[in-house]
Image (cartoon, grey):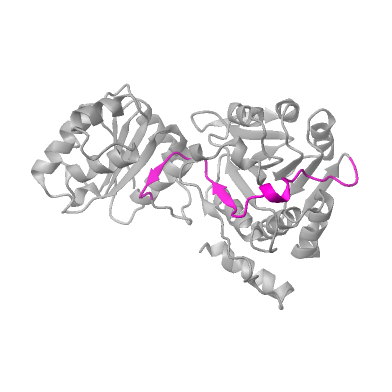
Amino acid sequence: VYPINLQKLIAVLHREPGLSINAERPEESVAVDDTRKLSPALLQNYLHIAGLIAKQSAGHPDWRRLAGSISTASQLHAGAQALALTRLNPPTVSRLAAFLAMRPSAQILHVICRIEKDVFFVEDEQGQDTELSIEDLERTLRNGSVKALVIQGHVSMVGMQKLLEHSSVQAVLNIGASEVAQQLFAEHFYSTLAIGKTVQEAYQTALDRIGPDDTHDFQLVAKHDAVLLDYPSIEKRAVQPIIDPGLPPLRNVPINPDFVGQGQSLLEMGEKLNDSRQLMIYGLSGIGKSWLASEYISRYGWRYSDGIVWVQVSEQTRAEDIFNQLRLLLELPLSTPLSDLENILRQRRVLIVLDQANTWGNGPELTELAQFVSRLDPLGGTRVMLTSWESISGLSDVSGARDLTLV
């Protein structure tokens, strides 16, 4: 449960003391464990929302809040159209363009990033800031199917009008105010759209929910008075909402909703893993090594298109346990010889995380794993990340290994 949910609950109960949860809708949002499982043909049965979230600042887990809003919105009205939320990873202009080129694509684009003087700061492939002007965004949207553009930030009225001029977009929304107000607005805006109301009706319903104190930070500009989205026919409508974090297959990866800061460390980790087969993260117990590794996966896991394996190391861990996790990830028989597994990994993009590797006390097992890592092609796509409070004999000496020390 996110800490912000407590603030949200307090705010809601102050305004709506009679509010009750709809117990007649048993469906809960399903988090997709492999973005490759979702096809445009499947998503056309949903009211599809794409999330472009760039450069999360310290203490602002924007993706998790948006996913939480969609999950809540999906349960507010029984019988509503199921919602699907897809995170665009990486949050780059090229990824957005490629996504919009798919048919069918999302009807709603929800953008969360830093905005200054109508310039959007998205990311490049390395996670660094890159500018996207209003004009470039309008051109990118021109050939897509996006009808509603939701901007979590502030764009000028002139900029909002430009976005409507030549693209498929029919309505542009500015969402400002506090984080609590933003989340409440998103919940009621999307839940109202899910029952077939116009964008204008959904906008007004959501404004009424957040109360008058925050409404001055919200704006809506539309091409006409009643912007209505397209909905699948009743017989084709999906039942269960889905949340797609835009990541490859994951095995045993923990998620920490309260992770804050360390943005520079995340960038440094990505740079070091680009040109080395192994990264060691050192630091005292409790300093946040494991959560840093987890957040790296949340932000940059898309780079490992064939999947990510997380192993919580203990004194009983065997090298074969790790090899079997890799076989399962790659959907190989457990009897696959280690040499075959190594050859496959040289051609794949996989991340192997060994958490708390310093607890591993078995020398022969460590030697076997070190030899395995040393045989991985440093120019290939498979990488190994370890967290430890001290260097580990054998593993720390692997050729080409890099390290990062947290203080």
Q: Position of residue 187 (x, y in %)?
A: 68, 58
Can you see residue 394? Answer: no
- Where is residue 4? Give x, y as percent: 57, 62
**Nearest the eye: 132 or 51:** 51
Q: Is residue 6 magenta?
A: no
The foreground one among 11 and 319 is 319
Q: Is residue 295 above or below residue 382?
A: below
Whole-percent x, y for residue 191 in the image: 71, 57
Residue at 40 percent of width and 44 percent of height: 250
Q: Is residue 11 visible?
A: yes
Report the residue that reaches farthest toward the front: 235
Identify the residue at horizontal 46%, vertical 53% (top origin). 259
- Give the mark count: 0
Q: Is residue 67 left or right of residue 223?
A: left
Residue 124, quarter of picture: top right
Judging depth in this view, the residue of 197 and 139 nearest the camera is 197
Residue placed furthest toward the bottom: 18
User: Residue reaching furthest right?
Assistant: 225
Position of 155 compared to 242: left or right? right
**Farthest residue in the top direction?**
379
| Dominant SS type (magenta) | loop
Q: Position of residue 288 (x, y in %)?
A: 36, 52
* Residue range (magenta): 224-253
**Splitting the image into 4 quarters, where does residue 275 fall?**
top left
Q: Is residue 230 magenta?
A: yes
